[in-house]
């Protein structure tokens, strides 16, 4: 969860500072877990990096009008 939030904040956070909250005193951040995609790769499946998948998802949602399109920051 924290990796997804960090990626999204990096792509769309205005100041790059990550002002969102991901945990609090009642619901602390959980420990991350890992898994292997070796079996999928052995079957010939090519996976996109999570950051690219998230970017593509947000862009698609913006194109369909489900998320606002933010103007570029210079």
Image (cartoon, rainbow, N blue to C red):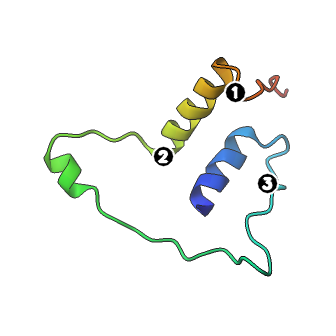
Query: Relative to residue 5, is residue 24 drawn left or right?
Result: right
Q: For residue 50, which numbered disc appears in the image?
A: 2
Mark 1 burial class by Cα count in 10 Å: few <14, some 14-19, many 20+? few
Mark 2 burial class by Cα count in 10 Å: few <14, some 14-19, many 20+? few
Q: Nearer the viewer, residue 53 or 15?
A: 53
Residue drawn where x is 85% and y is 26% of the image: 74
Q: Which residue is mark 3?
A: 18
Q: Which residue is mark 1?
A: 66
Q: CA distance from mark 1 to mark 3?
A: 22 Å
Nearer mark to the viewer, of 1 and 2: 1
Residue drawn where x is 21% and y is 47% of the image: 41
* Coordinates of residue 73 in the picture (x, y in percent): 84, 28
* Coordinates of residue 67 in the picture (x, y in percent): 73, 29
Query: Relative to residue 48, is residue 8 drawn left or right?
Result: right
Taking the view exactly as shown, the residue that stands out farthest to the left is 43
Marks 3 and 2, the one that precedes in the sequence: 3
């Amino acid at each position: 969860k924290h990796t997804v939030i960090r990626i999204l904040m990096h792509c769309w956070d205005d100041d790059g500072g990550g002002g969102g909250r991901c945990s609090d005193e009642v619901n602390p951040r959980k420990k991350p877990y890992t898994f292997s995609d070796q079996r999928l790769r052995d079957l010939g499946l090519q996976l996109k990096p999570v950051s690219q998948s998230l970017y593509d998802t947000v862009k698609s949602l913006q194109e369909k009008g489900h998320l606002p399109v933010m103007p570029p920051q210079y």
